[in-house]
Image (tube, rainbow, N blue to C red):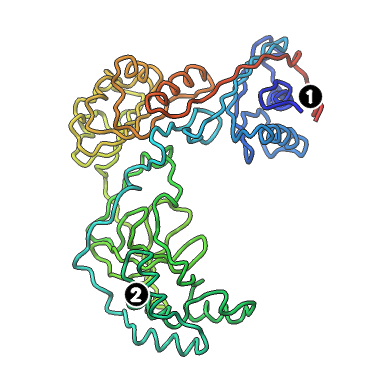
Amino acid sequence: MPSAEDFATWEPLLRLLLVGDTERRAGRSVRVSGRIGRHGCSLSRRRRGRMSSAERAVVEHTQKALARGGVEEVAFTAEVHPAGRTTLGLVRHCPAVEAASGDSGLGVLVLVDGSLPEPWRRLPAPAPEAVPAPSADPVLLERTLRERLPDAVGATEEEITAAEARLGVTLPDELKVLYRVTRARRDDWGDDQEARNRVYSAVGCELSALDDLHRVEAATRHPRWGREATTAVRTPPDAAVQSLAGSPGWIVFAGYGDELAVDLTPGPRGHTGQIILIDHEQSIGAELKADSLTDLVLNRMREGRPVHRERRSPLVAEVGSGGLPTVEAAAHPSLEVLSVRAGQGAPFGLGPVTGMPRLRTLIADPGTLADPLEIARLAGPEFLELGTQEWRVLLDAGAVPRTLSAAAIAGRGDQDRQLHVAIANELLVLWGRPRISRTVLEGDLGPARGQWAVDGI
């Protein structure tokens, strides 16, 4: 069988992407590109709409070849000349690359293994004055649950103490009451679905067993550098829930997918032991659902609170291309994310923000910086996205900030993927990370066709 680095493996896919290529019939070369992995693809097809079964067969043929070779994903670019001579470049990503969406760009280079953007590393602010809500009533809660679940098997004090030791927290009285009434182990009701349903009805949610209580860890919420490096959050003074990705005081006790947790680290206007919802589609933050577990069981749910919005957040700023007119206008002690876009006023100097203590992300379109070496004067960037020329200046001067945890190369990599890969590998080598491999294959697709066929698969 052809391997993933055999031109024959890619020929059917390339023919698919060349459907309707009027360029070659007019005597011009054509470039096609895409990204394909074992479980999905993004292709620069000329014909829009859903793939036919024959087209899907072509994609699956390529995916099977990748799977046989143990390859997770490949980005490719092919230049096809009018007579059919074809140069195919394959970029095989390494574990240090977070793949980009779409078919352009190399993705994000993760320079520090396991690193997370700053908001996902943030710990909860202390809340020494927080107390349980007035509605928290362990006596009423226990009476209600025992009336609803008279035959349930409850946890022993030793089991509750063991759970607290495992989690490293003291569980709130309401949660202890809940598990004293029912420890919610599947073994306790076996195949009795009605017993399980009674627990659900009694509590008002899909209760987890005492042994399954766990903290919300930021890393489990699937943050991606390519998306989250530009995210900045803060906890407003009137917030009930802190704007965090995770907390040692968020103890999940219910739910699969979306999860319910008791909150032992509430926001400035919150209560200890309040109930929050962790949305599986969000990678940061939580929503207040009830002031107490008693309220949850008695179905006294909170209405959604209005979202606190500032007219112009000083945390994130964009300069150029319809944004702020100057970098000086973006300078603020709280600035965390700065994007410099091509447009009127470029190139821009970074002098006004070199002293900003919280600036951690800089994204600059190619050609928008007057002096890329000013980046070396930033206080402590953790993420940079720059054009190839800007990276070249920093690399040649030995001025790439060592505070970086991740980096990206701006621009469409399909136009000069070899240069992008070369610069990416220089950055990866600086941090001792695995390099990206690039393979160039030569082949012949023959002259342009009016139609295409699935050949040889």
Residue type indicated by callout 1: Gln
Residue receiving disc 1: 451
The reply to whether discs 1 and 2 touch (Cβ–Cβ < 8 Å) is: no
Tell me the number on the disc at residue 292. Answer: 2
Q: Give the mark nearer the N terminus: 1 vs 2.
A: 2
User: Which of the two residues, 165 or 404, is positioned nearer the viewer here?
Assistant: 165
Q: Quadrant of the N terminus?
A: top right
Relative to 391, 49 lies left or right: right
Q: For marks 1 and 2, give the CA distance.
A: 66 Å
Relative to 298, 121 lies left or right: left
Picture quadrant where residue 231 is located? top left
Residue type indicated by callout 2: Ser
Q: Position of residue 106 (x, y in %)?
A: 49, 28
Q: Position of residue 398 (x, y in %)?
A: 30, 18
Picture residue at 37% right of the left edge, 77% below the top: 176
Q: Position of residue 56 (x, y in %)?
A: 73, 37
Q: Secondary structure at mark 2?
A: loop
